[in-house]
Image (cartoon, rainbow, N blue to C red):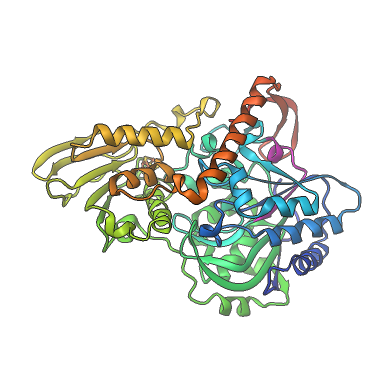
Amino acid sequence: MRPSTRPKVILRHCDSYDPERIRRIVRDGMAELGLRPRGRTLLKPNLVASGPLFEHAFTRPEFTEGVLMALRDRDEGQMTELRVGERCGITVPSRFAFEGAGYPAMLDRVGVKPCYFEEEQQVEIRYDHPERLRDYVFTPEAVALTDFFVNCPKFKAHPWTTVTFSIKAYIGIQDDRHRLIDHDHRLNEKIADLQHIVQPELICIDAITAGEGRMLTPIPRDLNLIVIGNNQVAFDSVCCAIIGVDPKTVDHIRITSERGFGSMDLDSIEISGDVTLDEARKRAEGFKVGLIRVEKYFEGTHITAYAGPPPEPEHTQYCWGGCPGAIEEAIEILRLYDAECDQKMPRMHVVFGAYDGPIDARPGEKVVFIGDCATFDGEVAGKPVQIRSKYRDRALKDPHVAKHDDIYVKMAKVTRKLASASEDQVVRFEGCPVSVAEQALALVRLGGLKNPYLSADNALAFTKNYLMWRSTAMAKRLTGTPYQRPGVSARGEARPELAAGEPAE
Ligand code: SF4
């Protein structure tokens, strides 16, 4: 639903993860915004990754607990359901992310059920806005049918999209097979498209300890802030102002604003609370956003990166939303699991997009072309190499038949590919995008590194949650749940007609 009320953003001081304190702050904020939950209420935290190695990547459970209690406090009997739902990082079971973040005990305490989006029935949403990348997408039933959506992201930098505040967190409202579609050089438009599914009525960001520089492995930065708002564009614009970034330079915020979802102009936003914007800015002085091209990112390491433009160069000269950013996140993960990651990595070269410059590889150094859109016509170590594009136009990708490759399938594929090419200097990985997981697995094999998916600390819990995910999905298929659900219009209004649904993965 497009926002109708005047956007308001409240900045509150909070220097501890005390659920009772957070509850009071959010309850006061809801009262100031005149908000009361109603109907099916769904809270979405950011649980992209969790556990001790990713401790600053996710919305802390104490924060979510405070918001859940505030929602209960503000309920006047209109709320029929209260759930917490999320799809965490691709290939990882959301159950695993919830567990690693300490959510099950907290949810039990508050009496709220979790909702793992990839285990839900997926509902088709038809878009009708003129700028859409496609005519329909899928989202979990819980999202499609929510009456009162609460977005509780983590205040973080993002290496592909500058920041991940409220609008960007919408990437978590799709399961893997649908999330990966258009997760490429048009990612910012995909994020803006997702805004047409539903808009949050309440946004509360965990900026008590924010995350600088990166998205999965951010550097903790105490801002001691809770920011509360009722409009995503206004909210993200104020968050940008806190870290000294012009929201007009952040494409997913600018495009969402241009679609009519809210103003980026601070003069049109009412800002209140016990922390002024100037004070918040002082706390965030020098905040690093981490937006960095892949060539620069790998400077000084054993990896040399080369990037040419993705398809549709009229839109952008660099694929910010796909393969190049994924390899940056992949190496950050591997560094966490293997302290000698950079030293162990042999000299190698990674190439993205339509690259037409020299590749400075000596004989024996691997050259890895990553992504369907990679092209090259030149020499590698004195031998001619021709790489042709395998990129398929997005119009040929049908969300109805999108398939999911789980981590074990990806592991087998990567192992097979590198084993069969062990004598070859040039290797090509196909996909659009080639995901963080696939690139991490490839680097594991090429560098002889520790495999994070098989780490002793993780393996048991990961496998248990993986099996629960797959068996739940299988049970839903076998019980023949009817794949028809009430449709929802692109602007979130209930539609009388039925739209086709899809079972869980
Ligand atoms: S193949 Fe990779 S680099 Fe090329 S457009 Fe797709 S996501 Fe971007």
Q: Could you tell me which quadrant the C terminus lies in?
A: top right
In this image, 362 relative to 160: left or right?
left
Q: Position of residue 12 (x, y in %)?
A: 71, 72
- Magenta region, residue range: 141-152
Decide which of 438, 190 is in the foreground and name it. 438
Q: Position of residue 412 (x, y in %)?
A: 39, 33
Quick check: 284 above or below 38? Answer: below
- The quarter of the picture where residue 93 lies is top right
In this image, 57 relative to 294: left or right?
right
In this image, 482 relative to 283: left or right?
right
- The quarter of the picture where residue 253 lies is bottom right
Is residue 459 one of those drawn in magenta? no
Residue located 77% across and 50% down the image: 108
Q: Position of residue 427 (x, y in %)?
A: 25, 38
Decide which of 355, 251 is in the foreground and name it. 355
Is residue 149 one of those drawn in magenta? yes
- The quarter of the picture where residue 417 lies is top left
Q: Could you tell me which quadrant the N terminus lies in?
A: top right
Residue located 48% across and 46% down the image: 187
Residue located 35% across and 57% down the image: 293
Quick check: 365 above or below 137? Answer: below
Question: Does any portion of residue 179 appear in the rendered image?
Answer: yes
Residue located 64% across and 63% down the image: 206
Q: Quadrant of ligand 1?
A: top left
Decide which of 407, 144 is in the foreground and name it. 407
Q: Position of residue 97 (x, y in %)?
A: 59, 48
